[in-house]
Structures are given as structure tokens and as C-alpha cells.
Amino acid sequence: MLPGVKNCCKFNYIRVLKITVGNVPLLIHSIKKMKKIQLVDLNGQYEKIKDEIDAAILNVVRSSAFINGPEVAAFQKDLEKYLEVQNVIPCANGTDALQIALMALDVKPGDEVITPSFTYIATAEVIALLHLKPVFADVDPDTFTIKPGEVEKLISANTKAIIPVHLYGLCADMEPILKIAEKNNIAVIEDAAQALGSVYTFSDGTKKKAGTMGTIGCTSFFPSKNLGAFGDGGAIFTNDDSLAKKIRMVSNHGQSEKYIHDIIGVNSRLDSIQAAILRIKLKYLDQYVSARNNAAAYYDKAFINLRGFQIPARFEKSNHGFHQYTLKLNGVNRNDLLKYCEQKGIPANVYYPIPIHLQNGFKNLDQRQGDLSVTEDLMEKVISLPMHTELSEDQLKYICDSIVEFSEKKSTVFV
């Protein structure tokens, strides 16, 4: 131990520099403070493109075109090109995107929509808001995404849509889901809020981006997403031009033209400042996904043989966008691990501790505890580590070393 570093902050580390004075090699030790680890480092990402972002915001302010300005139309075109989809309809947030998608399908109260329970509440919330019936399907224990076989079992005469969720950045198995939907004349609405930039490969080699495979795709630009705004935002995608026209009407008070309201709609639009920011960040989206994958690979290497820790599964049909890096614990006390991470300054989290079918807001449904065995098992076992584009090697090493240290404590592992 070097003199003076005995009581050094636990988030510091020692750096050794080798220099030569004359012919004499010298070692110089210095203490470098590691940057605070964040679950998502939005400021670090901003600093790298600060000049572009600031200029884009200032341009909108100077134009005063804050609502439906040219930046919104430009972002729409840029995203259509990136996704290789015919129509992008920007809106206010990802929840609105899902609601508008359902409204455009002319569903009626009592119609059923199949979706996973192991996801964020918004997916099922919009179903309930429209007085539809959510029917929850179980998920794959490794990929955490909805199982096509479970979907097929739940189809009834009242089923009008399936909403697969591309959870944590990994595409659901879309090919069999689309076949089931086509066979039963059911619409598919993709919830791609966590997977923008991910790509699914069909059995014939065709590749399509998340959100572009179903009848309609939806995404969120919440700041922490892989493509995040500096506030709320969302978008809807479709290759059906007539459906796109309906979606645009629904999202704009049901207007076919100004002051002509042919249907009941909502007020949901992406503002120009957010569009300008997203246009800049879209240029870097593939780099962001690559950076997340690099961080995931670092975690994988540290945890792949660690007892009680199952690394995120890879799926041969989809690359992973790693919106979250989520471990599945086997025989490890998750509460103890969460407390340990908090003590170490590592912001771990659980997505999601209570599945939707067990939430009080959905207790009037038929499904009860025990009905979705995989989902209910996962709610007890998953834990997500910091994952974003700005994780440095020293932060990743500190996180991995800390988790390994925890695992080596016999009191924390039980069988």
C-alpha cells in the first residue's frame, strides 16, 4: 500500500506510470478518481455531440416553429430511411403510440389483445384504457420475450391483435408470430420501445428492423432509450399507406383536414425541439448500439462462468440492442445483491418486480398468480446492471469485480 492511500475512497484506483530520468526508470503512482457510475449517463452522451445538439436546438428557437415545424418532417423522413419503412408518424410518447395504433385498428370494447405480462405497464395499460381485454401470454425463460406457442393457445374468436414486446433490446420471435396472426386474420403491433436499432432475420435470410415487421410498430424516445430525446417522444411505423393515413388522423384530433374531424382522435405530437435532437442522435444510433454491445461483452466475460449468474441469452434470429443488461439469478439472494450494489455505488435495478397480471389495476382479469409460471419465476430472479453508451473500462471492471466479490461470499449463495 502506498503512503497516503490507506483511507482512499473506494471509487478511486491507483494508476502506475513508468518514466525514465536519464537512464534510471522510475515508477510514479497516482490516484485517479473514477467517475460516478450511473444507470444511464445521458450527460456524458450529450457532451460528445454538444455542439451539434446545441446548434439544432438554437435553430428551432430562432425559427419559432415549435409545433409541427420542418424538423419534425425531416426527422420523420430520416427515420423512415433508417428503418426502411414506408411511413413514420411521430407522436408525443411511446404510450400514446400504442394507444393510437390500437385506435387505428377500429377495435371495440371487449375485443381481446394478447401481450406479455413481463413488460412495462404501458403495453397493457392502453389496452385497458380502450376497454379492451388484455390476455397475457407467458415468455421464454431465456430470451424473456413472448412465446409464439403460448400466443397460439390463447387465440379466441374475440382476439383482434397481438402485441409482442422486444424486451431489453432483443426482438421477439416474429416469424412464427406473424404466421399465427396471418392464419387468424389478427393484427400485430410491435412494441419496439426498447429495441430501436435491433434487427430480426427471417428463415429466408430477409432482415428487418424492430418495429417494421408487424401491421404497426411503436417506439418511445424516452431519454433513457437507445434513441432518446431530451424529454418525451414517440413514433408509429407502418408499411400500409391507408393505415398510416388513419394513424395521422387519430393522432391529430381525428382531422382529415383542418377543422374537419371525421373520427374521434387524440392530441399527440412530437415537438420540434425533440425532433431536432433526435435527428442528430439518429446519426449515432448504430454506434450507440455497438457501444452497448461492447459493454455487454465485457460483462459476459466476467459472469459467464460465475455460479448463480446467467448472462443474457443471445437469439440467433436477432441481434441485441442491450437497452438493459439483465442477469437471471439462480440460487442468489437478489435483495442481498441489490443492497451490496448500493453499498458499492453500483445502481442496479429490477425490470420488472411485479408482472402486470399481478398488479392491482388488473385484478379484475381472469388470470391469477400461478397462471404464468415463467413470468412469475423471472420476477423473482432478474436484475439489471448499469448499461449505457458511456460506460468506461474502469467502471465496467469495478462493477464486475464487485459482483464477483459478492458471489464469492458463501453466505450469499444458497442451493
Image (tube, grey):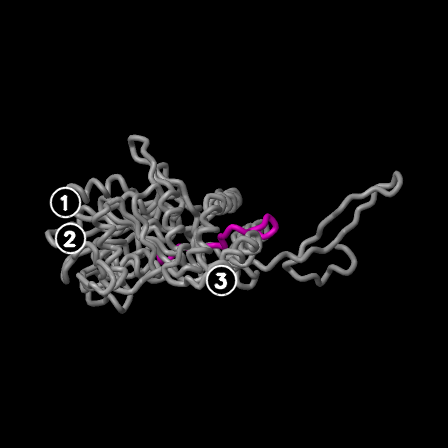
Task: Look at mark 3 in the image and give the residue it sits on.
Answer: 62
Label 2 vs label 1: CA separation?
A: 9 Å
Residue 357 image position (x, y, % from top left): 26, 61
Residue furthest left in the image? 157
Image-based side of 162 in relation to 29, left or right: left
Q: Secondary structure at mark 2?
A: strand
Q: Residue furthest bottom?
A: 360
Q: Is residue 398 visible?
A: yes
Q: Amino acid at mark 1?
A: Asn
The residue sitting at 34% across, 41% down in the picture is 84
Q: Residue tagged by mark 1?
A: 184
Say which residue label 2 marks.
159
What residue range appears in magenta?
379-395
Q: Between tags 3 and 2, which lies in front?
A: 3
Query: Marks 3/1: CA distance?
Result: 52 Å
Give the mark, 3 or 2, whose residue is nearer the N terminus: 3
| Residue at horizontal 44 percent and vertical 51 percent from the top | 279
Q: Amino acid at mark 2?
A: Thr
Circle 3 Cα neighbour tier, 10 Å, few/some/many (<14 / 14–19 / ≥20): few
